[in-house]
Amino acid sequence: MARVEGQAEAPFEGLRELLAQQIASGDELGASIVVNIDGKNVVDLWGGHADEARTRPWTQDTITNVWSATKTVATLAVLVLADRGLVDVDAPVAQYWAEFGANGKQGVLVRHLLSHTSGVSGWEEPITLEQVEDLAVAVPRLAAQAPWWEPGTASGYHSTNMGHLLGELVRRVSGKPMKQFVADELAGPLGADFQIGAREEDWPRIAPVVPPPPVPFDMSKLDPTGPAVKTFVNPGMDARYSWTPGWRRADMAGVNGHGNARSLVRILSALSLGGKVDGVSLLSPATIDHIFRKQADGVDLVLDTPLTWGIGYALTSDASRQSLPWLPAGRVCFWGGWGGSLILMDLDRKLTFSYAMNRMSYLMTDAGPSPIGNVNAEIYLRAVYKALGVEGY
């Protein structure tokens, strides 16, 4: 059996064996799992390898690119500014970033950016990945273009560009780039080992992601002028880009956050715990309530799967459980990253769950590949709720 380190309190001891089994089978390469309940990490496990050649173990301080799980930190940054009275989520984005009001976007509200309903889910004009990494090029293009659908009427997942949009908003309001704001206002005060991009001195402890197999889906069947194709193919994304210096140095808070399950839980448990973590206060209960204001509830125009979006996070609902039937009911918000990483906040139980890994894979559903999570994420989350005696698990 593969070696798994860390601790798991009763009744969660079975997670250690589950993680070891998945590593031994080859379904996992390296991974970390953390469960926090009422402010205490009752599970903090890690194991496997940090590289595909299996020459480096996944250790307590291994970090990896968590892809779109980064968005959960970026949206928290905006909510922190809202809590401080510096941003109104119901105000036009152009109130803070005047150029964004161009080309029919005067009515796009901050909450539209936070809920993937702005109509700006990607770049209109052809753009290279190197240009996406350059905010001076990528951000003004987003500000200048027209929305692809009427803002506020439906969600269309802001796959790569969400961090560019929120990052510019944060910079305009706080004077700090998103990367610095996260370091100074979130990760730093909480002692969380999480960063947008990755400092060069931390590169040796990164577990590079291993690309997933090709998606069994024919993009040619989609409308080439529709938001899904325009979002995902301009530019196309290869997971191996995340290995490059340019990616690691960039400030792209939608896709290039580096951390592990422990650091994600450390930051996002602020939501599960009423806004405060070990004396560090980030949000008021009133600001947390904003998250659960439903903004979209139906088939996402980009992901082509049913989802319910609140302000900043997906919510558990009948729509979301059509895509992810293993989601718990209740006052729960969540999201994750390409290939499997997941962060879920269960406010009813004061529980925060996270899983981060380096072997990317897909969770297949009747509708096709799931937008987040993988088979392992489902297995571990089900085990947590089964251990708690929740009906249905």
Image: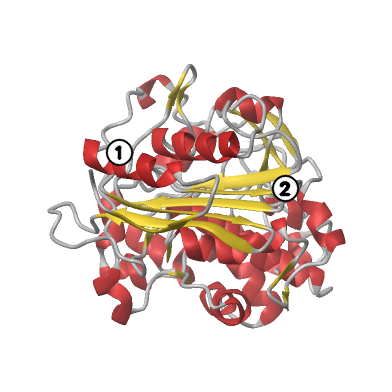
Displayed quadrant of residue 234: top left
Q: Residue at x 61, y 32 (%)?
A: 300
Residue type pointed to by label 2: Arg
> Which quarter of the image is occupied by the C terminus?
top right
Q: Nearer the viewer, residue 49 or 340?
A: 49
Q: CA distance from mark 2 to mark 1?
A: 28 Å
8 vs 217: above or below: below
In the picture provided, is 283 more to the left or to the right than 244? Answer: right
Residue furthest top as drawn: 366
Q: Under tag 1, what secondary structure?
A: helix
- Mark closer to the chain start, 2 or 1: 1
- Asked if residue 116 can be seen in this view, the reply is no
Q: Residue at x 29, y 46 (%)?
A: 359
Q: Nearer the viewer, residue 64 or 2?
A: 2
Determine crowd level at label 1: few under 14, some 14-19, many 20+ residues with C-alpha closer than 10 A. Answer: some
Displayed quadrant of residue 92: bottom right
On the image, the x and y values in percent for residue 38 come to 69, 59
Q: Nearer the viewer, residue 72 or 240?
A: 72
120 vs 142: above or below: above
Q: Under tag 2, what secondary structure?
A: loop
In the picture provided, is 56 more to the left or to the right than 310? Answer: left
Q: Are marks 2 and 1 in contact (CB under 8 Å)?
A: no
- Asked if residue 11 can be seen in this view, the reply is yes
On the image, the x and y values in percent for residue 22 come to 31, 39
On the image, the x and y values in percent for residue 177 come to 56, 77
Q: Residue at x 41, y 56 (%)?
A: 45
Residue type pointed to by label 1: Gln
Residue that numbered label 2 is attached to: 349
Residue that numbered label 1 is attached to: 21
Q: How is the image coloured?
A: secondary structure
